[in-house]
Every structure is written in structure tokens, then in C-alpha cells.
Amino acid sequence: MHPRHVTRVLAVGLSAGIAALAGLPGGAAAQTAAPGRTADIVLVNGKIVTVDDRFTVAPALAIAGERILKVGSVAEIEALKTPQTRVVDLGGKTVIPGLIDNHAHYMRAAEYWDREVRLDGVTSRKEALAMIAAKAKASKPGELVLSLGGWSEEQFTDQPGGFTRAELDEAAPNNPVVLQVIYFRIYANSAALKALGVTGETPDPRNGKIEKDAGGQPTGVLNGGGAVAWTLARLGEVTKERSVENARALMADLNRMGLTAYQEMGGRAFNAGHIEAFRTVWERKQMTVRTFYNLWQEPTSPADVDKAVGVIATLKPFQGDDWLDQTGYGETVYFPLHDNLLNRGASPTPENMAQWRRIAQAVADRGMHLNVHAQLRGTIEAFLTEIEVINGVKPIKGLRWTMSHGDQLEPQDIARMKRLGMYVQLHSRPTVQGALMLGVHGDRTYAMPPLRLVQDSGLPWGLGSDATAVTPVNPFYTLHWAVKGEMVGGRKVLKETITREEALIAHTRSNAAFLFQDGNLGSLASGKYADLVVLDRDYLTVPEKEIKDIRPVMTMVGGTVVHEATAK
């Protein structure tokens, strides 16, 4: 395993006794603290929410090297100190395990991270325009200003709706502006249309439409998934070194939001270069977010499936370490069967299911983990039927095969999944898509996904985001939605909510299983990595409506401070 992957450590202002944490011992400690081991760091006078099996809460915690030495009373922790031990006085603040996102697309997002204006959680359209203008002002003329998803027009409470070409021209007269809405729309200003080569004569992209005014000129709106893909393919090349720096910057932002580990799911236009940027950060020992990825190939034809099966036969997961590793295959198995949450239903054809089966069977034959994207009734039922057949040929129990999203899961599906030893990941896409879902699915939306049903079923599950294009990144938005059932802007979109304790377990301890890191991550216990977050308010007692507003004061990964909020 690589030793400490952080070369520069932030000063810690929570206690005068811990001015800096640079140079702490590296390397992995044993899973249980050795007799006589003393603490390098202690956190005292706080509320340590361990999220262990008993949901223990304690006032203090000790760290030795990268791992937790002990959680206990202040006296017990004080006994582990030496004159060299750094002391963090929490002053009553709450500490939780580092949050784990079980399903995200951060490698791809990192490519243009320095050019993004994230509108996550912004409820004012006026504020959104001001943010775009500020980014343009801070940029050189001609530099892109992007917002590649994570928001919706329905989240604005002052004036719901999109953006006109004139508004974006005023906000950024000298910079191309491209705003992506989920995967179905682009808003562009005049500079962006020019950079993209869009004129009145430009033909519509496949599966997309360039909207035009009465005079035949482009309005700045490009509709449809094909138009989004067409636009993104024309954003321009990013150098390897810039991609590496953007990966580091993205990790820093994730740390700022309390995320310390996640499972990468590839995505459309995903390529080896996206993995290589993160691998370079890993090689330079600069990782601050533990990254576990599945391979995504996106086959779209039988010929593509032939190639994919050949690649699967060569895969060897778990050759990395606890900072960067491949865990399996997925989430999309065969792209023509990649269903859409905003469609009314899905009707897989026998021909497409035959290709899907070839990929899934190859993964089973290899003895690997598979993550399966399935949202609607048609695909959920069809995929489970195929998995049952595969299981009869090559048993999958123990491989933690997982259904991603499961928005329309029903009790009979859960029973089948339990028999197969499967897991499910549920995601917070209604935080921005809830209003759109109500327009498509009506009242059924209030049980999409069915958090309470799954929580009470005993099926192993975890809570994640599916960021960055279709949902916000911030995990406290996800936790707020799971508890309150509200999308960004306050509209009620989910009635199958869970308690805040259940949500926290699902976003920490339960998610460690998807990373195959149960013994290392997910709770604050002796022998586990010291991945933790100090909060600015108490998650367990703050009013539910304020969960979304919680901010980390400090984030540690492997006993190293990777984020510290500056005092205001």
C-alpha cells in the first residue's frame, strides 16, 4: 500500500495544540490497535457519532498513524497521549465518519472542473446568473464557462425556467457559456454558438434539435440527448497535466463537502484518460479521496459486445490499494437497454436482452462484481430474470452484484434480489428531477425510489448521489432529501423517507460494502481508517430542514487533515 498520499497538510485551527499535522507516520496500522500503542492525534470534548453496529456516541477518539486507535471516554483517550501527541479540542462539535458516495461520475467531471460553475443547491435564478457572470469576469476572454449538470430549471424559486441567449450574453459577453440541464438540454450564449460552429444552416445532431427563432437563427437552446452529447464532444481537448490538477481540485471540493471515498461509475464519453488522471495523482501520492472504480465499456451493438467480452476475460480487479482500485464492472451493461428515469416505461427487446446476457454472463464467469443500471419496471424485471438464469450457471452470491437506482422496485423484486444475494444503491436524483418526475410518473414519484420499503426489507443497500450531471454533489443535500423528501427549492417529491440515523448509516457504513472496504471504512472504530468529518452543527439534533445546510469544519482522511474551514 502507498504510504500517506498527502504532501501538503492544512493547519488545524480547532486547537492551539495542533498547529499542523504534516509529517505524521505513514503506512497502514494493524486492524486492531497493538498493546501499548500510543496516539499521534486525539480528538476530545466532542460528540463522536461512530455509526457502528450500536450507533455508539462517545466524547473522544484517538488516532495512531492512518487508523483509529480507540473511541471512548475523555479519560480513556487521554491515557493514550504522549508529549508528542497532537490534541484537537472539538469544543462540543459533532464528528461523523467520512461520507461515502456509492455511485458517482467524478473522473469524467474532473476533466473540466476548473471551468465549471456548479449550480448545486442554488434556488435563485438571479443568483445563478450572477455566479456565471463572476466566473466569466475571473476568466480570460475566450475561456469556457460551463455548468455540466447537477441542477434543473425547476429548482429556482424566484423565477423557474432556463436562460435566454441574451441573458447569457450579458453575463459573459467575452466567454463561451455552455449550461447542461441533466442530459436533455443545453443553454448557450452567442460566443458558445460561434465556438461550436452553430449557425442557422447547421443541421440538427442525431437525436437532438438546435432550436431556431422565426428568422431561422439559433436561439441558444439545444434540445435532446443527442444535442447534449454533440455539444460536449466539441468542448476541446484538455492537457494531461491540467486534467491531473483538475482531479486534485475536484477531490479538494469533495473533501470540503465531507466526502472521503466513492465508487466511480464511468459514464458517457468515459475513456481511459479519465482514469489515468486519477492514477497520476495516486502515483504522486496526492490522493485525498479514496477512489474505487468499475469498468464502463458502453457497448452499443453485437460487435461491441464481442469486444467487451474479450476485455472482461482479461480483467483483474483488486490490484490497487485502499486509495485507488478497480472493484468490478458496470453500471451500464448494454447501452441500448440503459433506461431513462424520465420515460414512462421500458420494454427491453429479446434481441437486446440476449446481448445484455452475454456481458453479464462473462462478468459472472470471471467471478467479478457487477453493477446494473435499472430504474423502471420493464428493465428491473427483465434483468432479474436474466440474473436468475446466470446464477443457475455460475452462482453470483458473494460477488455483491448490485442494482443501481431501482426507482420502481417492488416487494417481489426485493425478494428475488435477496435470494440472489444482491445489493441495491438508491440515489438522490429527485433533488433536482423530482418536479419533472411528477410530470411523467404522477403520484408514483412519491415512492421513487422506495427508501422506506428497501430500508425495512433487510436487503443490503446504500445511499448515494449519481453526481455530477443528474444530481448535486453535496452529500448533505442527499441526506436532507432522504429525511425530508424535498427537492432543491423545497418542493415535496418523496414520501417514502427514512430517519436521519438510517440515512447516515446508508451514506457511510452501508456504502463501505460497495467498495469492498467493510473492514476499513464506514464507521469510527478501532482499526479502521481515520476518515472522519467534524461538522459545524449537530447532524442528530439540528432541525431537519437545516440538514442540507450542514458544512464540514474539518475533514480527515487516513488521519491527515485534507480540509479545514477558514474562520469567518
Image (cartoon, rainbow, N blue to C red):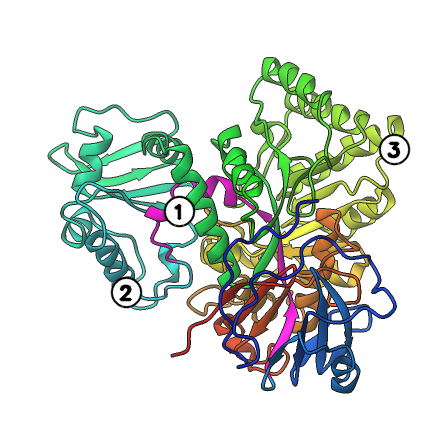
**Disc 3 marks which amino acid?**
Pro
Picture coordinates of residue 498, whole percent (x, y): 67, 68
Write the residue at 29% across / 53% down. 162
As measured in the structure, the alpha-carbon distance from the residue carrying label 3 to the one carrying label 2 is 53 Å
As measured in the structure, the alpha-carbon distance from the residue carrying label 2 to the one carrying label 1 is 20 Å
Q: Is residue 136 visible?
A: yes
What residue is pinned by disc 2? 127
What residue is pinned by disc 1? 113
Q: Is residue 560 above or below residue 264?
A: below
Picture coordinates of residue 157, whole percent (x, y): 34, 67
Give left or right: position of 368 versus 2: right
Kindly state the secondary structure of the residue where label 1 is placed. helix
Picture coordinates of residue 275, whole percent (x, y): 54, 35
Q: Residues within 10 Å of mark 3 (few under 14, many from 20)?
A: some
Q: Quadrant of the C terminus?
A: bottom left
Kindly state the secondary structure of the residue where label 2 is placed. helix
As measured in the structure, the alpha-carbon distance from the residue carrying label 1 to the one carrying label 3 is 41 Å
Precedes in sequence: disc 3 or disc 2 = 2
Write the residue at 64% across / 47% down. 323
What residue is pinned by disc 3? 395
Question: Extreme front residue here?
Answer: 83
Q: Quadrant of the N terminus?
A: top right
Q: Nearer the viewer, mark 2 or mark 1?
A: 1
Precedes in sequence: disc 2 or disc 1 = 1
